[in-house]
Amino acid sequence: MFSIPEQFSNATKANFEAQFAIFSALSNKAFEGVEKLVDLNLTAAKATLEESSNTAKQLLSAKDPQEFFALASAQAQPTAEKTLAYGRHLATIASSTGAEFSKAAETQIAETNRKVISLVEEVSKNAPAGSENAIALFKSALGNANAGYEQLTRTAKQAAESMESNVNQAVSQFTAAAAKAAPARA
């Protein structure tokens, strides 16, 4: 049987280890998201450079102003579609990174919470007589903190879902408007 100071020392060590694990997991998820974003931007930049070069060649080969403007206006629809695709891909990266970030945080926090509750139960068994009120108060505070965390988690998930829904709706409306505008120009 451990003394109460040893239990708290072990709990403090475990808490630091858990915080380091949370930090590591969240850092890894953040770097994965940044890596995907950098890859998307590099791919988009390469494609844009190639397309710009091809478009410039086509425009320079135009024989008269009418052909020049016809070629230029023909580029508008594909450019809008590529911009929308980029936006969708960017939104996908952001939402998947956010979901992975939340999942990693929830897993680590749940494990830390489990360890704290276990420590409180162990300390409660070995607590001196007359400390029941303090232990009950601590357990109540811990329960309130957990309830607050759960409410915060639910609210954050709802906000993320709402934001993703709004982005998807905006992209859909822009796509529809671009599709309507394309036949009008032709």
Image (cartoon, rainbow, N blue to C red):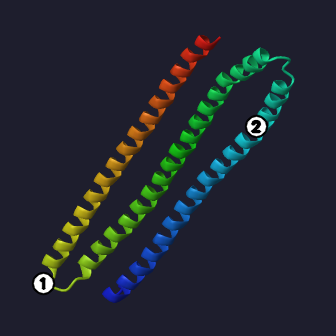
Q: Decide if residue 49 is on the left or right side of residue 167.
A: right
Disc 2 is placed on an element classified as: helix
- Residue 159: x %, y % from top left: 37, 44
Q: Residues within 10 Å of mark 2 (few under 14, many from 20)?
A: few
Front-most of residues 149 and 181: 181
Q: Quadrant of residue 11?
A: bottom left
Which residue is drawn at the image coordinates 51% and 20% (left, top)?
177
Q: Which dot, 2 or 1, sits closer to the camera?
A: 2
Q: Decide if residue 169 is on the left or right side of residue 139.
A: right
Disc 1 is placed on an element classified as: loop
Identify residue type, mark 1: Gly
Q: Decide if residue 160 is on the left or right side of residue 60.
A: left
- Residue 90: x %, y % from top left: 58, 41
Q: Quadrant of residue 179?
A: top right
Name the quadrant of the N terminus.
Answer: bottom left
Q: Residues within 10 Å of mark 1 (few under 14, many from 20)?
A: few
Which residue is drawn at the image coordinates 29% and 74% (left, top)?
120
The number of callouts visible is 2
| Outermost residue toward the front in this view | 65
Residue marked by disc 1: 130
Which residue is drawn at the image coordinates 47% and 52% (left, top)?
103
Asked if residue 26 is positioned above or below residue 68 in the image, the reply reads below
- Residue 105: x %, y % from top left: 45, 58
Identify residue type, mark 2: Ala
Front-most of residues 21 and 176: 176
Front-most of residues 32 and 109: 32
- Residue 7: x %, y % from top left: 36, 83
Name the quadrant of the C terminus.
Answer: top right
Residue marked by disc 2: 47
